[in-house]
Image (cartoon, helix red, strand yellow):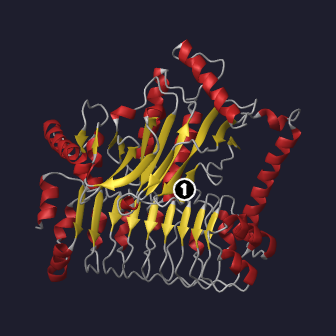
Amino acid sequence: MWTEIQQVQEHQRHELVLTGPDVAKRIAEAGLDEHLYNLVSVNFLEISKTALTLLDSRLGNLKNLTRLVLHYNKLKELPESLGKLSKLKFLDVSHNEIEELPEVFSSLTELHSINASVNLLGKIADLSQCVHLTYVDVSHNKLEDFPENLCSGSLVNLLDIKLNANQMRNVSPEITLLTGLKQMDLSVNRITVLPKELSECQKLKEVLLQDNPLKDARLKKLIDQKPPKFKAVLDYIRDHCAPMKTAAATEAAAGKAKAAGKSKNKKKDGGGDEEVDVVLDEIVIMQGTDESKRVVCKPSVAEVRPYIVCCIIRNLQLDVPAKLKKFISIQTDLHDDLCDKRMAATIATHDLDLIKGDITYEARPPRAIKLQPLKRSADVSAEVLVNQLRDEADALRKEKKRSTYSGIHKYLNLLQDKTTYPCLVAADGTVISFPPITNSDKTKISPATKNVLVEVTGSKSLAVCKAVMDKLLLDCLKAGLVVIEGEKTGTEESGDDDVEDVTKAVAAVAVTPSSTAAKVLIVEQVKVFEEAGELKVVYPSRVDLNVSHVTVTRS
């Protein structure tokens, strides 16, 4: 039995990583150790950078897998037993030689992300039952036609699709069925004509179309402009490209037009109509100024944890114990669900007024990161902290006779084999965050906090980080964690100050919440820049928080 597999069995671990030259040599000489298929308690499995060509059907025995990483191998196919992994959320089979995905994805209803890039795929499987999908990457394959299997009205959570570097000649008009789609990469294909329906995707704001032999020279010139002008491209497609609707796409478009018409009529009527009875909550987005907090992202995080979005919430009411507890509970629930146990993304919140100057997001060797972790009284290096947490985890697991880690300890595997760790550093050198493990006790939120800086970092995609931030803000609004004018807070003095601060903040940017709004959440944009000064991401941008059940007012 291989040592790695034996250790997982003996220590009742739930993660197994098999990678590198030594593993590759063993697989080449004798194949994969069959004892692997007995590790039924494992929830994370990675086999990478080997010459593995085939997986046994017993892969289906690993019924507790939530994350399966099989990239950089020589796999020709995936076993049908993959369909037995009903808890699977993240699947990465990129950089292999797979020609066809098995038709078993109807059983993988918990899937959030699929990466099958850099293979030999000529088609993809039916994904319509994977209703939690947010991300699909099938770039660098041999797709000749736009995959119709992706165009399903059930995929309401699908945010990001990568289809670049294929051989596609068309774009399906049924793309309009993907009502949540925000980003799509269709570059480096053989597309000659684009359908008008592409511009009718309700939330699509970024579409890459470079290096296609488009017949429309003006459109091709517009697409090739740098930086990309996505809105101008989509407007041109809407005004100059012909529709190619199928019956299903027509029905979807008609439904959306009807809904949009109703919404418009409600706004015009203003009152006296029964349709105006519904009072929507509101999010007011304040545009950042030259004095606003900014984040600089260094190249060192690119290979560790490259994605980050931040924003500032100006009117959370945290001096009421129940609301502070609920705010923490919302983050915990998101970490368990949408963040996939922090594997996809991690949330951290800070008292903005305790952070000095601008923030740097970078990666450092573990010894070079010193911070005061939450609920600890002194600074400690990340290296010492991680070692302490591992020792605590093993001791606690043995004492309680548990087979799994709990609390913060269950995230330690995310740092396995990392030579540098990500961190956020304030201008005075204070490390305020060490994702995905902890943030600093020095900037933690408390009942006295009035302005909250929220960060979401991740290793999967920017779209996932934005989706997490969207959900956090909407959940805070829904839970009523905002200061409401005229409502008593935990202490009368702090309540009056908060209301005054909110009023001044809104007035400063000439944005007034709707008088009919039930609850109002005030959010300030934060811009993230590359080290060279180029804007990397701003949140919330005009493509974020596009929801129908909340009024969004942008300055």
Quarter-of-image position of residue 488: top right
Decide if residue 259 is in sight here.
Answer: yes
Q: Quadrant of the C terminus?
A: top right
| Count of numbered tags | 1
Specify few, some or many for label 1: CA neighbours under 10 Å numbering under 14, 14-19, or 20 or more: some
Give the left or right position of residue 108, taking residue 292 as reference: left
Q: Is residue 154 above or below residue 379?
A: below
Q: Residue furthest top?
A: 492
Q: Label 1 amino acid?
A: Val
Q: Is residue 486 above or below residue 471?
A: above
Give the image location of residue 445, x and y in percent: 43, 30
Helix, strand or loop at label 1? It is strand
Q: Is residue 133 above or below residue 484?
A: below
Quarter-of-image position of residue 88: bottom left
Q: Quadrant of the N terminus?
A: bottom left
Q: Which residue is mark 1?
A: 537
Give the left or right position of residue 539, taking residue 255 as reference: left
Give the image location of residue 429, x and y in percent: 35, 43
- Nearer the observer, 258 or 237: 237
Q: Is residue 248 above or below residue 433?
A: below
Give the left or right position of residue 322, taking residue 222 as reference: left
Give the left or right position of residue 27, taking residue 536 as reference: left
Q: Which residue lies at the image location 45% right of the left edge and 57% below the top edge?
A: 307
- Nearer the observer, 226 or 270: 226
Give the image location of residue 91, x and y in percent: 39, 65
- Nearer the observer, 245 or 470: 470
- Nearer the observer, 29 or 316: 316
Give the image location of residue 193, x and y in percent: 71, 82
Q: Which residue lies at the image location 23% right of the left edge and 40% below the top edge?
A: 380
Decide if residue 132 is in sight here.
Answer: no
